[in-house]
Amino acid sequence: MADGGAPVTMSDVARLAGVSTATVSRVVNRRYGVRASTVEQVRAAIEQLGYETSLVATSLRSSRTNVLGLVTHSFQSYTAEVLKGVMDALRQSGFDLIVYANSDLYGTYSDGWEQRHLARLSGTLTDGCIVVTPSREVRSGTPVVVIDPARGSEAPSVTADNFAGATAVVEHLLGLGHRRIGFIAGRAGIEAAWSREQGYRTALAEAGVPIDPRLIARGSFDPDSAAPLARALLERPDRPTAVFAASDGMALKTLEVAGELGLRVPGDLSVAGFDNIPESALAEPRLTTVDQSMYRLGNEAARMLMSLVRGDWEGPRRVVLPTRLVVRGSTAAPG
Amino acid sequence: MADGGAPVTMSDVARLAGVSTATVSRVVNRRYGVRASTVEQVRAAIEQLGYETSLVATSLRSSRTNVLGLVTHSFQSYTAEVLKGVMDALRQSGFDLIVYANSDLYGTYSDGWEQRHLARLSGTLTDGCIVVTPSREVRSGTPVVVIDPARGSEAPSVTADNFAGATAVVEHLLGLGHRRIGFIAGRAGIEAAWSREQGYRTALAEAGVPIDPRLIARGSFDPDSAAPLARALLERPDRPTAVFAASDGMALKTLEVAGELGLRVPGDLSVAGFDNIPESALAEPRLTTVDQSMYRLGNEAARMLMSLVRGDWEGPRRVVLPTRLVVRGSTAAPG
DNA sequence: ATTGCAATCGTTATCGGTTACGTTTGCAGG
DNA sequence: CCTGCAAACGTAACCGATAACGATTGCAAT
C-alpha cells in the first residue's frame, strides 16, 4: 500500500527491486530486453509500494502520454454533452482524457484563452487536444480538432450544419405565417454564429421577405447577454411575431423576458432556439429548436483526434454533421 | 505570435531578453530581486514570443500549481452537474481545474481507479483533488475532498443526506398505500448506497411493514446493470406494487423494463428514483425522485478543497447537504 | 578458445522550470 | 580608497521519468 505521505517514485521501486530506474521504466512500458525473473522482481516491488507512474514526469520527458486534452472556457449544458460523446469514443481506446477549464480570472471573454490553455497542455501533457468554440485560430505543436471553429479557421474541425439548421427553423416559422421574425445572433467571429445568421438571411430572402436590420440583435451566445437584447426587440412598437435565437440559452432567456413583458408564448410570440440542450425540453412551453447533437460532435471530434494522433486519418479535415428541426410548443401561427 | 511548431520555452525568452532563465522565472512569478528595467525587457520578450509557462514543468519542480483536479471514472449526467458546481465555485478564485477521466468501460474498470488517477495527478500536477464516488478509501499527499465517499472513509467529504432522502421516498410510497415496495440497491461499498438502503429499511420497519429480502436487488448504480434486476423483480408472481431504485439512472431503466412488460406507470406500478438528474423530468411519466443537488455537492466540495489547500478550513470534515423529495407522475396509489 | 551477436542492464544527458547558493554590482559610510 | 551590505543576477542542482548509449553477460557457432 502507498502511504499517504511522500509519493512513491520510480527510484524507490528501483531501490527495492535492486535494479536501476531504467529497468523499472522498461518493465512499466513493457519494453523488450528484460529477463523474466527481473520483470517479476520489479512487478513485485511496484505492487508492494503501490507505485503509479507520474503523468507529469512522463510527459515532460516523453512525447507520448496517451492522454488527450479538451479545452473549454466555460462549463455549460452543451459542454457536458460533448464530454459524454468524447468519453464514449475514448472507451477502450487506451487514451485517457484531461479536461482543462479555467476559472475566468481574466473576465468572461478574455481573448486568447484557447491559446493559453493549449500552450499549457500541449507539447507535453497531452498527445492532442479538442478545443471547444475558440474565438480565434489556434496553433499547437500537437494535433488539434476544433468543435465549432472560429471563422476562417484552417484547423481540422467538427461542426454541425448550422446553415441548414437555421434555414429549417426560419422556413418553419415562415410556414406558420410569420413575416416579422427577429434574430438574436451569436458571438461574432464564430463560424457557427455566422452560418446561422446566413441561414436566417437566406431563408427570408428566398421567401421574398425583406430583411429588417432592426430585427437583428447581436448577442454573444451568453444567455445573460441575451436578456436586454430580447427586451429591446420585444418592446419595439412594431415588435416581431417570432424570435429566432442562435442558441437555446438565449432562446430560454427570451422566453423569460417575454413572460416578464406579459407576452404569452406561443400565442403572442413564437420563440425558437438552436442546440437542443436538455433544458429546452423542460421549458414552459417546450422550446422549438434545432438538434445538433453535441454528443455526436464530441464523439466525432474524439475519433478524428485519435486518428490524427496515430497519423492515420483518412477523412476530410472538416466534418459537418446534419442537424434536425425539433418542433415543440414554443412556435405557432401568429395571433 | 507563437509559431505552430516547437513550443516556446523559458530559455527562448531568456535568450531573447539577454538574461538567465532564473531571472525569467522570477519575473513570471513576480518575485523580488529584479530591476524594473529588466522586468520590462523580459516582459517584452515574453510578449514577442507568445511564451506560456508549461504546466508540466512547473508542477514537476514546484509544489504549487494553482490547479485543482477532479477525478471520476465515468461521465454521466450527475458528473456534469457536479462540474458546473465546481466551476462556479472556482470562478475568479485563481484556481484552474483539470478533470481526469479514464477511457475504460464503466463497469469493468477494476477497483482502485481512484487511487491510480490520484497518484498520476497529485503530488505534482494539482494542488488538491476532488474524487467522485470512489469505491475505497483514497490516500494522497495533497488535500482531497470526496464526493460520496466509500463506506467507513475518513477523508474529508461532501455528501447528501441519503438516509433522510430515502426514508422520505419510502414514506411517500407507504403513504400512497404501497406495502410491497421493491428496492434496487446501489453499488455496495459506497456510503450513499448503504445509507439509502438503511433509509429504505428503516422507513419500512417504522411503518411496521416486514422486509422481504426477495424484493431487494443488488445493483451497481450502473443503469445497464439495473435492467435485468428490474425485470426479475417485475416478473415475480408476487411482484411489488412499487419500486424504489437507488439512482435515477436505474429508475429510468426500470421504467423502460416496465414498459416492455406491458406494465403501466403509475397505474400498475409506481417507480421512484434518487438524484434528480435532468432526464428524470423528461421521462414519461416524469419520475418521482429525491433531489440531492449534484451542483451543490460539487460547489461545496470545491470550496472545501480550496480552503484545505490554503490551509484555512474551519468547517467540519464531513459536510452533509439536505435532500428534497420531488413528487412527479411516476408514483400513485396502487391499483 | 575465439568470435559474433543478441539479450540484459546501468549510466547519463535531457525535458522545462524552480530555487538554494554564490557571485557580481552599486552605493553609502568610514 | 576601502569596507560593508544589499540588491540583482547567474550557476547549477534538482524534480521524475525516458532513451540513447555503452558496458556486460550468455550462448552458440566457428
Image (cartoon, coloured by chain):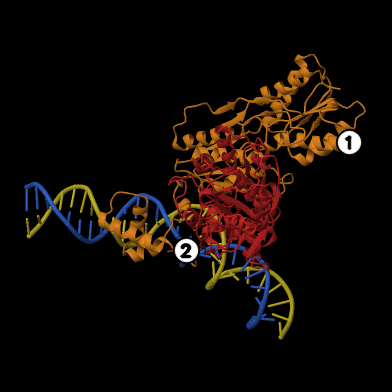
Chain colours: A red, B orange, C blue, D yellow
Q: Earlier in the sequence, mark 1 or mark 2?
A: 2
The reply to whether label 1 and label 2 mark residues of one chain is yes
Q: Secondary structure at mark 2?
A: loop
Between B330 and B227, the residue placed more toward the observer is B330
Q: Which residue is mark 1?
A: B261
Between A151 and A68, the residue placed more toward the observer is A151
Is residue A86 at least partly visible in the picture?
A: no
Whether residue A229 sits left or right of residue A292 in the image: it is left
In the rendered image, the vertical position of residue A334 relative to residue A211, given as above or below: above
Residue B2 position, x and y percent, is 44, 64
Circle 1 Cα neighbour tier, 10 Å, few/some/many (<14 / 14–19 / ≥20)? few
Residue B153's label in the rendered image is none
Find residue B176 and report its image quarter.
top right
Q: Which residue is mark 2?
A: B7
Find residue B177 and report its image quarter.
top right
Q: Amino acid at mark 1?
A: Leu
Residue B68 position, x and y percent, is 51, 43
Q: CA distance from mark 1 to mark 2?
A: 60 Å
Residue A301 position, x and y percent, is 64, 57
Chain containing the residue with disc 1: B
In the rendered image, the vertical position of residue B302 relative to residue A206, given as above or below: above
Between A309 and B108, the residue placed more toward the observer is A309
Is residue B120 at least partly visible in the picture?
A: yes
Chain containing the residue with disc 2: B
Q: Secondary structure at mark 1?
A: loop
Location of the C terminus of chain A by quadrant is top right
Location of the N terminus of chain A by quadrant is top right
